Image (cartoon, helix red, strand yellow):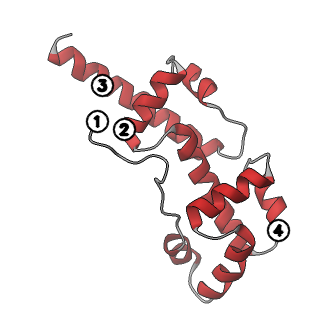
Amino acid sequence: MTPRRATDQYLRDLALLRRVRDRIDREYARPLDVEALARDVHMSGGHLSRQFRRAYGESPYSYLMTRRIERAMALLRRGDLSVTEVCFEVGCSSLGTFSTRFTELVGMPPSAYRKEAQRATEGLPSCVAKQVTRPVRNREAPLSGSD
């Protein structure tokens, strides 16, 4: 493949990856899996996962879970839903998996986060509270020199 064709293909793939990322951002609460996301952009699941990780530093599943946890954090700060209700509201089907991922990304269980966040963000505008409490990620998707 010529350098020009390789660049063109890379740009086409990047546009498709943005479509996948945008879909995850929009539909995070719906059941999504890598194979379905890949079919929609006419890629194999493996190719999508490799390209997505190369472009964004994490797998599509990890990106989806980060979006879900970010939304869960906002709902927990609001305080009117139980942890179980928040779990299902953001599209998770297992409370155990939700709690484990939440703890990995945020550093504390959802119930502890709710108590801490309400104290820490009291009096802050919601746009500032969202930025201050955004999860830090990439424990399972470290960038390596071999990518």
Q: Which residue is mark 4?
A: 81
Q: Earlier in the sequence, mark 2 or mark 4?
A: 2
Q: Residue at x 54, y 23 (%)?
A: 45
Foreground mark, 1 or 2? 1
Q: Residue at x 65, y 32 (%)?
A: 33
Mark 4 closeness class: few <14, some 14–19, many ≥20 residues within 10 Å: few
Q: Where's the C terminus, which quadrant?
A: top left
Instruction: Name the amino acid type tagged 3.
Output: Tyr
Q: Measure the alpha-carbon separation of dots 1 and 2.
A: 14 Å
Task: Please tell me whether mark 3 sits on a helix, a strand or a loop.
Answer: helix
Q: Where's the N terminus, which quadrant?
A: top left
Q: Position of residue 134 (x, y in %)?
A: 52, 67
- State the image quarter where residue 82 is shown: bottom right
Instruction: Name the amino acid type tagged 2.
Output: Ala
Q: Which residue is mark 2?
A: 55
Label 1 close to label 2 by CB (< 8 Å): no
Q: Measure the alpha-carbon separation of dots 3 and 4.
A: 43 Å
Q: Position of residue 42 (x, y in %)?
A: 51, 16
Q: In the drawing, what numbered circle is on residue 111?
A: none
Q: Which residue is mark 1?
A: 146
